[in-house]
Amino acid sequence: MTSPASTNIDYERDGLQHGFLKIPYSRNDSAWGSIMMPICVAKNGNGPGAILTGANHGDEYEGPIALHDLANNIDIDRIQGRVIIIPTMNYPAFQAATRVSPIDQLNMNRIFPGQATGTVTQLIADYITTRLLPMCDYVLDIHSGGKTLEFLPFAAYHELDDKTQQQACESATLAFSAPYHLSLVEIDAGGMYDSQAESMGKVFVSTELGGGGTSSPHTAEIARRGAHNFLVHAEVLDAKPTTVETGSIKLDMQHDNAYVFSEHNGLLEPCVNLGDPVKHGDLIARIYSTERTGSEPVHYHAASDGIIMGRHFPSLIKIGDFLNVIARIVD
């Protein structure tokens, strides 16, 4: 079935266009309504194609900030090829400041390739898969930790069966110039935008830039610089990359015990900061029972050497929640 999603953008027309992806959504307050998702396309002649997206999860803000800024200031005369900018990929979730869509409760980053007969989130994923990705060679999806996670700011690629493709992804990741970079081990890669783009042979780069349900001047600037450098690397933007004084530090999490999960409900006391070095056996967190006093907290210890790359953000934690991730610095 052809997607019911549509747009007022002409992808083949040269020039700078600002418009919408229109996703039909019949609801109580608008029987023939639609979700109007902002999109910007810059095209100038023939050349590579790149798509840049933010707010795959609606409570992550560095991507929307950097990509709205890029859409406002992109110089069409410096473009050779096509750039597609979607600052808020999961627009309903972004408007609600939630990780998943409030309409269908679906996680955008777990339902690819989407479905043309599905719910709003599935329709967005289907349109991106069938209409936008085929036009693109390079894909940048800017994430941060959202309300429940916080990370050292890093850019990432994945281990792929096609090592030539993997090398191209790693090169683009380095070009992004985040303070850290790594080959990311996903807890659950099924249905991810990453996996879909990679399965179609695209050069894919993802990030995690901070978290806590907000942004900072530091992380917003990393996203801005990274988006610029990514387009320069893709040879879509004729400009010089923005350099940083210190190079990107390579991390490795291709080892057992990188992830630490909570086995208790309660009040979380972090005992280490992001970026802190740890040794096997070091205390990294305490979890207190909130149901009674006089109960000793449960201690959590590092199961490997490395540095703290990510942490649970809210101070209340539930059994099964992510607690920390430990990575190793690669010399």
Image: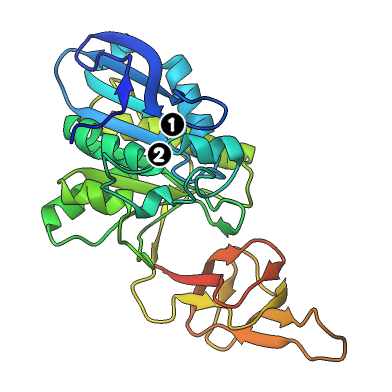
Q: Quadrant of the C terminus?
A: bottom left
Q: Nearer the viewer, residue 168 or 246?
A: 168
Q: How is the image coloured?
A: rainbow
Per the image, label 1 sits on a secondary structure element best described as: loop
> What residue would you read off at disc 2?
120
The residue carrying pointer 2 sits among few (fewer than 14), some (14 to 19) or many (20 or more) residues within 10 Å by Cα, namely many
Contact check, label 2 and label 1, Cβ < 8 Å: yes
Q: Quadrant of residue 9?
A: top left
Q: Which mark is residue 25?
A: 1
The residue under the point 18% across, 29% down is 135
Q: In this rendering, is residue 193 above or below 189?
A: above
Q: In this rendering, is residue 52 above or below 265?
A: above
The residue under the point 75% across, 87% down is 297
Left/right of residue 3 with respect to residue 18 in the rendered view:
left
Q: Quadrant of residue 262?
A: bottom right
Per the image, label 2 sits on a secondary structure element best described as: helix
The residue under the point 36% across, 78% down is 255
* Image spot of residue 280 (x, y percent): 52, 86
Q: Nearer the viewer, residue 166 or 131?
A: 131
The residue carrying pointer 1 sits among few (fewer than 14), some (14 to 19) or many (20 or more) residues within 10 Å by Cα, namely some
Q: Quadrant of the N terminus?
A: top left
- The image shows a total of numbered marks equal to 2
Q: Nearer the viewer, residue 89 or 175?
A: 89
The residue under the point 51% across, 51% down is 153
